[in-house]
Amino acid sequence: MDVRMPGCDGVEATRRLAGVGPRVLVLTTFHHDAYVWGALRAGAAGFLLKRASPERLIDAVHAVAAGEAVLDPAVTRDLLGHLLAAPAPEPAPADSSDSERLAALTAREREVLRLAADGRPNDEIAALLHLAESTVKTHVKRILAKLGVHDRSQAVAAAYRHGLMGPHPYRLPGAP
């Protein structure tokens, strides 16, 4: 079904909705970088491709409703690929509070953050680290609090911005 929004596209609709409060999960067939960036900049809390399984969609709706950010793994890989291929920006001058926040993360919280940055949902992170999913959720909440951010995407951005992220050894069986 082709649904048209006169005078408004999905990014603009996201901007309008995000401006009045509800958290927006974008579900689309568009996998174009400009569209993804536009939706995220407009305030989308999640971005899934329509090929996502019904279970993944339900999980994403619950995660967004709970204040988490969700990105389709294919979108995450593409975005990270572009970020890593681009010339490294000059690091933002870190004030002492930034340094203190990053230093406050435990080794386990850093592991969880690295896997979240790789686009892994909580259940996969739990499997990789041999933890209960509830434990991973607790780690994510602590990471957000320690970094002073509102959702996973902001935590991942802060970690990259301050050089916290690097290569990591975790891969699911059969994953590239």
Image: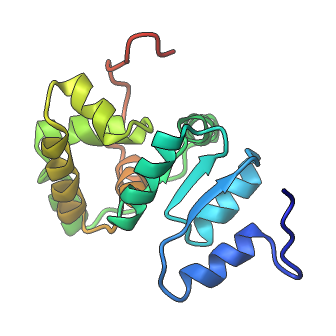
Q: Quadrant of the N terminus?
A: bottom right
Report x, y in % for residue 20.
53, 89
Report x, y in % for residue 80.
55, 39
Residue in the image at 74% along x and 68% along y? 10
Q: How many marks?
A: 0
Horizontal side of residue 149 vs 18, given as left or right: left
Report x, y in % for residue 83.
58, 42
Residue 6 against residue 41 in the figure, above or below:
below
- Residue 86: quarter of image: top right
Residue in the image at 32% along x and 18% along y? 169
Horizontal side of residue 87 vs 131, given as left or right: right
Report x, y in % for residue 91.
44, 54
Horizontal side of residue 44 vs 15, given as left or right: left
- Residue 14: quarter of image: bottom right
* Viewer-nearest residue: 166 or 88: 166
* Viewer-nearest residue: 80 or 14: 14
